[in-house]
Amino acid sequence: GEDVEQSLFLSVREGDSSVINCTYTDSSSTYLYWYKQEPGAGLQLLTYIFSNMDMKQDQRLTVLLNKKDKHLSLRIADTQTGDSAIYFCAENPNTGKLIFGQGTTLQVKP
Amino acid sequence: DGGITQSPKYLFRKEGQNVTLSCEQNLNHDAMYWYRQDPGQGLRLIYYSQIVNDFQKGDIAEGYSVSREKKESFPLTVTSAQKNPTAFYLCASSRLADTQYFGPGTRLTVL
């Protein structure tokens, strides 16, 4: 069935790189997304990748997609305290609905 | 300024009351969605609508109702039948089968 899985928690030191991982199930998904949620706020679209790409870079963010293993990752370079948030992975299986993971809480220690 | 607005930001409900959460968008999106988020958990889809005057149940529709009389508006009513309504409610909109954009959320607390 449809399921997107993420690890629940990641802790890094300020200045280090963070890597958040996600696995998804629907190989027909055309887009895969990363959203960021700060405390008490809605979800903010961070970046997305088309399924025919294997990498996308946007400033400090790098998204890697391995379609064979249905694995998606988000790398944040030079992680700052302002990056502390919950990060959600989501897939778009073209059913009119997105499938979200449970979210990974990123804690950045000064 | 284009975007999605939700009101109120905080809402308190007494047991047995119905309450309505507002969601408006001026992005000209066809589709709108309501999600529920509980502490430490992901998003669960309550209802969604892809066109005016039509909507579909999501995974947890029991105890909720919606209407879609206008393209810009998708209000959610939390009825007294919803046994545990305290949660954070998020509205989103998108072009059909496309990227979803989220509002700031409404936190509902039952007193």
Image (spheres, grey):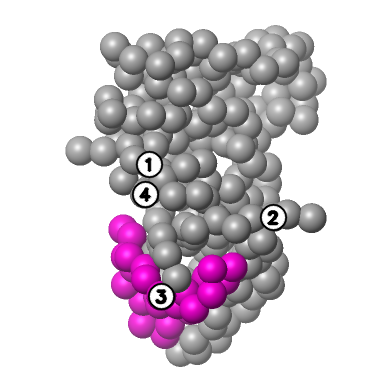
Question: Closer to us: mark 4 or mark 3?
Answer: 3
Pointer 1 indicates a residue of which chain?
Answer: A
SS label for mark 1:
strand
Q: Are marks 4 and 2 on the same chain?
A: no
Is residue B65 part of the magenta span, yes or no?
yes
Question: Closer to us: mark 2 or mark 3?
Answer: 3
Q: In this rendering, does residue B108 appear at all?
A: no
Q: Is residue B78 left or right of residue A58?
A: left
Residue position marked by numbered label 3 in the rendering: B53
Q: What residue is shown at x 38% (from left), y 48% (from top)?
A: A97
Q: Which mark is residue A99?
A: 1
- Which segment did they paint magenta? B53-82
Q: Which mark is residue A96?
A: 4
Position above or below: A54 against A96? above
Q: Is residue B58 left or right of residue A20?
A: left
Is residue B4 part of the magenta span, yes or no?
no
Gap in Å between the C-alphas at discs 2 and 1? Answer: 22 Å
Q: What residue is shown at x 45% (from left), y 11% (from top)?
A: A54
Q: Quadrant of the N terminus of chain B?
A: bottom right
Gap in Å between the C-alphas at discs 1 and 4? Answer: 10 Å
Give the percent coordinates (x, y) of residue A46. 63, 32
